[in-house]
Image (cartoon, rainbow, N blue to C red):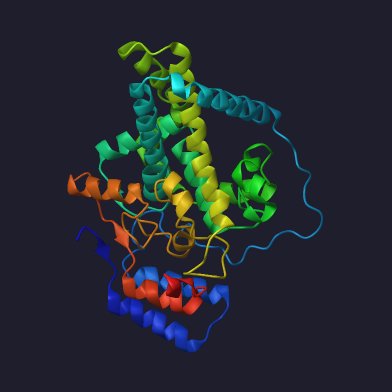
Amino acid sequence: MYRRQCQLHACSTIFVQHNTSHCHSRCQMGIVMRRLTQSCGLGSSPGHGRWYLDETYREKEGPKPPMRYVWRNIILMSLLHLGAIFGLTLIPSAKIQTLAWAILCFVVSALGITAGSHRLWSHRSYKATLPLRIFLTIANSVAFQNDIYEWVRDHRVHHKFSETDADPHNAMRGFFFSHIGWLLVRKHPDVIEKGQKLDLSDIKADKVVMFQRKYYKPSVVLLCFTLPTVVPWYFWNESIVISFFIPAILRYTIGLNATWLVNSAAHMFGNRPYDQNINPRENPLVSLGALGEGFHNYHHTFPYDYSTSEFGWRFNLTTAFIDLMCLLGLASDRKKVSKEVILARKMRTGDGSHKSG
């Protein structure tokens, strides 16, 4: 009852026309999807349409540019994961309040990415009031996965040039690269070039986002590391070592890897019930860890759907959160694809796995 549905007749008509014309090229498919969103009233929000796959892009011929390592990131990521392993050994010694606090910090930080950077700012799949935008911005700084502006830029480039040299975490370069390796080397020149040409005017117009970008480093020091450490140490006398290595370091590392699994595992392992012509997959295990972001074949097929899934709250805490915000009057205008359109797409381009459950 909370969902804004597409106009079913108009959408279904487009799909029927496309199906009977036997258009098999991905380029023609992209044209139909653009027409679909216009007919469904999904093309009016700022930023919409900027993340569709660019069929005109071609990778440059000849040898690939040499890989240049970013040793600072390699060292810091190595130390971070070593710290997280040490944090794991401290769990038996931690107070129950500290573990609960670490889980709360994880959920809040994850929502800053899933409900914030991803579904709100990258895809404009719903609208948020100022108080909710401020909360999601704070949560995003707790997550420390680049500021919102940079996260949106990279994510829109990822959708527009998915699985090509212009994709920041191109899964065709292997699991390790798409998971963490892309952060340990210099970006491919095409990633930089396409990112600079991307239209981010809607993000630049958001004063909350640009405020965070201006003060991002101090916000991360305060919200990602200091606050998670000080609370258990001050309020229930947890040791400073446990307070730092569990709610701060371990929680942060788990949050990073949960997000990275969307880029790696959800592009490699799982079925493709909506579009077998693209790489992203449906991966319920990734959804569990990433609060609903593992329904990736659906998401890349229907990137404007606020739920990133057709299954509502199932394995999708982010959708439940957005629905709650709507109930409280803090969010609105959720965009959702109709079941008729989803079924038509499954029948036309899916791998048939939906028939088995």
Q: Is any part of residue 138 visible from this angle?
A: no
Q: How many marks?
A: 0
How far across and how far down the image is residue 53, in percent?
Answer: 54, 63
Q: Residue furthest bottom?
A: 20
Q: Quadrant of the N terminus?
A: bottom left
**Residue 19 visible from this viewpoint:** yes
Residue shown at 44%/63% (left/top)?
298
- Residue 340 vs 55, above or below: the answer is below
Q: Percent from the top left, x then y, of residue 167?
A: 61, 52
Q: Is residue 196 above or below residue 243?
A: below
Give the residue drawn at x 47%, y 36%. 255
Q: Is residue 45 above or below residue 110?
A: below
Which residue occupies 78% across, 60% down? Answer: 61
Tell me residue 105's x, y (percent). 38, 30
Residue found at x 31% / y 78%: 10
> 237 above or below 175?
above
Q: Quadrant of residue 345?
A: bottom left
Give whichever of 161, 98 is nearer the camera. 98
Depth check: 18 or 311 in front? Answer: 311
User: Horizontal and vertical percent for residue 78?
Assistant: 64, 28
In the displayed orientation, state which residue is furthest to the front: 92
Out of 336 and 81, give the one closest to the viewer: 81
Please identify the quadrant where the C terminus is shown.
Answer: bottom left
Splitting the image into 4 quarters, where does residue 134 fall? top left
